[in-house]
Image: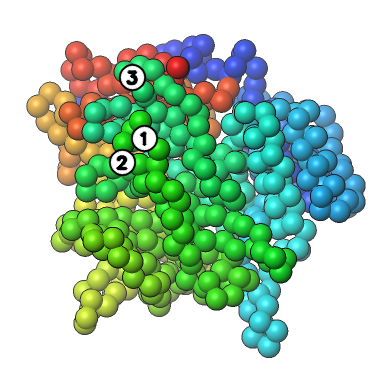
Amino acid sequence: MSRRSEHRPGADSPAVTAAGGRPHVVAVVVPEPADAVTPVGLEQAGAEIAVVALQAGAKEGRAALDRALAAAADRGCGVLGAPRVLGGRDSGDTVAALLEELRDLVPERLHTLDPDPVHLSFDRASGMPEYGVPPAHAETAAHALAAARAWQAESGRLLSVDCHRAGSDPGLGAASCRRYPAPATWLSAGFDGRLTAFLPTAAGLVRRYQDAPGRWTGPEPVEGPGLLPGLSVVRDPHGLPHVFGLRRTARGDGGVDVEVVHAAQYRTDGPPTPWHSLGGPNRGDWRRARAVGFPAAAFDAAGGLHVFVRNFGHSISRRGQAADGSWTAWEHLSGTRVGDDLAAVTAPHGGVEVYARRRDAPGAVRWFPGGPGGAWIEDRALPFAPRPGTLTPAPEAGAVLFRDLHTNEACLWQPGMPAPRPLGEVRGSGPLGAVRGVERDGWAYSVLTAAGPDGTCLVGAYPEGRPDTGVWWQDLGAPSYEAPAATVSRTGRLTVAARPPGRRLVLAGCDERAGGFSFGDWRPAQG
């Protein structure tokens, strides 16, 4: 099998361009113009950027944003005029004013800051966390999320939202500070082969599914007030999708509750289960509880579910559900302080292990059960350092995928390897998705997906369990502002999905009549 990179022609076909050929509008909502510099730096050619600031800010900040917008224009972005400054308002007026701006802009995506920023220290005398950003950052993000939810509800248009940390890790650029991870497993195939796409939006989770071959429903909301714009989808041993997220709700005392939630889909054409709250590891104090990281989850070979989050102390907490449905309490896995990135995997021994990116130094750590009484053991001697936002489960049991911190090279590592294994020429950014069990020409293959340098969908394949033989990559052409995803049906049929500009979902299937990995044309998901 050839391992050269190929580019599929037809990337500019009508199926994958924005609606009406119009570049998609991206709104950036921040407290002051200087706060928009980082998210503006994320945008690629074709986006039309509109900055909305609550305050005019300092002259130096406005000048920094002018430079960032000029650089974006040089990359091929449009700039929709000068920053729109709302001026001082109370909370209700701010949300209403932001809603008016969204009505005028009709954005497809929205960038804002973190509504629950990471704390730097904790004052034990007062019981208050201490932050490295002003309160206006979290307040603005909360207002922006409220306005975005309201706009999506009244317009019926899907609005994707990214919430960013105020800063990023040195030298890594703006993409390293995303608060809620980019999902890479949002496409799922049911027992009958029909597909479901789970999409995170401003108003929470929505889904689209096939009610007949080639015909799609929706998008329809998966009800759940306060759901934050993040998503993790994990399949159980029967292949059924389970969805995890965070829910943020206001308290009567002026605080907020942030809790882990879980739902499952047992039939493609049936509604998902109601959201089940798993609470959080620091639920006794809402100021600590709001710091919970985004959940990572995996099933063990016996059908038990294991859910992991970063807790207030920057270590990992775990909660488990046995195959009989009973839940354990949250337990803390003490050890190295970690960042937001977690990846839970099912290991060759049938149990579950969890990987995390270190918070205070380059590197990664791994926890696995095996101590006295089933205690968790920490392995700090991993020979790799992942780039933030790229740590995901690999197709092989117990292995992880990531991009190297220093080179951005896509790699795989599993216990026992002296060094990570590079996965070939796969430039770009963001996490890699993975599926296994793809049957082609009498062989089983693992398939990887990734976003290329210009946002297009890359697909790689290698014989299942043998990444050492090399990965054959091809560029399927369709741009996707979310990480592309793939799924394989019980009969081994492979489908790849992307979300190009224009609020559309497009899919390409592996051509069953052709040998190797030949894909048909991209087709929109239509009703």
Circles 1 and 2: CB distance less than 8 Å? yes
Instruction: Name the residue furthest left.
Output: 442
The three-letter code of the residue at mark 2 reads Tyr
Disc 1: CA contacts within 10 A as few (<14), some (14-19) or many (>=20): few
Q: Which mark, residue 266?
A: 2
**Residue on which disc 3 sits:** 212
Kindly identify the residue that appears in the image at 66 percent across and 82 percent down.
Answer: 127
Cα distance in 3D space between marks 2 and 3: 17 Å
> Disc 2 on helix, strand or loop?
loop
Indicate which disc, 2 or 3, sits on the residue closer to the N terminus: 3
* Residue 482 visible here: no
- On the image, the x and y values in percent for residue 397 come to 21, 52
Query: Which of pointers 3 and 1 lies earlier in the amino acid sequence?
Result: 3
Q: Residue at x 23, y 59 (%)?
A: 323
Image quarter for residue 409?
Answer: top left
Q: Amino acid at mark 3?
A: Ala
Mark closer to the observer (3, 1):
1
Give the quadrant of residue 156: top right
**Above or below 239: residue 373:** below
Q: Which residue is mark 1?
A: 270
Residue 380 in which image quadrant: bottom left
Q: Amino acid at mark 1?
A: Gly
Quadrant assignment for the C terminus: top left
Image-based side of 155 in relation to 448, left or right: right
* Coordinates of residue 415 in the picture (x, y in percent): 23, 61
Circle 3 SS class: strand
Q: Nearer the viewer, residue 76 or 227?
A: 227
Residue located at (48% from left, 14% from top): 15
Camera sees residue 216:
yes
